[in-house]
Image: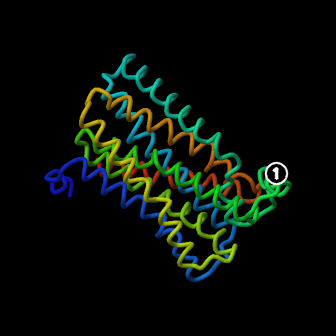
Amino acid sequence: MIEYLSHFNLIWLGIMASLVAGLATGVGSIPIFFTRNISRKLLDALLGVAAGVMLAATSFSLIIPAIEKGGGGVRGATITLVGILCGGLFLDCVDKFFPDTHLLANAMNETETKHTAFLNNHSWRINPRIRKVWLFILAITIHNFPEGLAVGVGFGDGDIANGLSLAIGIGLQNLPEGLAVALPLVRENYSVLKAFLVALGTGLVEPIGGLLGAGLVQIAKPILPFALAFAAGAMLFVISHEIIPETQNHKEHSKLATHALLVGFVVMMFLDNTLG
């Protein structure tokens, strides 16, 4: 398969792989066509697996290659260190515009957050709950951009196996994310089809990131180690700030989510090394 894909243009491969990973958000929302009664326990487990998958993909497909391609030793580690911190800082700045997105709280329609309370105390022209849902969807859409960037960068230097493993990892992570986007829309009386299309749409920014990542690396090969590390820092921020805390909000499910994270990590580790 790797040999067959090697005949294609790397930028197009990056775009297509990030597109497929982004489309996984739509696939993940398919259960809403059959039921809207998705348990919090199941979502915790799915997000735990997603966190493990993304941690493994970040470690083996971004951080380790960044160190190696940066020259190894002190030089490679320093470039990677700076890149990770810059990527995390970038996502932190983006996140400041979208406080309290609360992935599962939105999906499960739980007790309002401080941000919701703030909205309820002001005169908005639209329903505050709907406004909160759409703020959450916008935040998820923007957070998907660095995921596409990571896939594009993974393909950018010709390492197709690395790009594929990243695309698989991000696609798996997008499955529960798509469900978490669609559920609150259905609960706010949006049609199932519209909720599905919105969930699908949140992942379609990933090919844009894929194009940017693959294109930049193709144009300027020396930036590859930094680009890999930058994407890793962005992913680590999302995993640590958004995904893992959400799975630990309910103590009765926290150990299940931790076990699911371990499963996701080892499965992705195996896939990454098998593909490589």
x 48%, y 68%: residue:
26
Q: Position of residue 52 (x, y in %)?
A: 53, 50
Left or right, residue 185 beside residue 175: right
Residue with the mark numbered 1: 118
The amino acid on which the numbered mark 1 sits, given as a three-letter code, is: Phe
Which picture quadrant has residue 156?
top left
x 50%, y 60%: residue:
202
Q: Position of residue 40 (x, y in %)?
A: 69, 66
x 22%, y 47%: residue:
10
**Extreme residue toward the bottom, this view:** 34
x 25%, y 30%: residue:
221
Which picture quadrant has residue 219?
top left
**Extreme residue toward the right, this view:** 121
Element type at mark 1? helix
On screen, residue 112 above or below 78: below
Quarter occupied by the N terminus? bottom left
Q: Where is residue 17 in the image (x, y as percent from the top left)?
A: 32, 56
* Label 1, residues with CA under 10 Å away: few <14, some 14-19, many ≥20: few
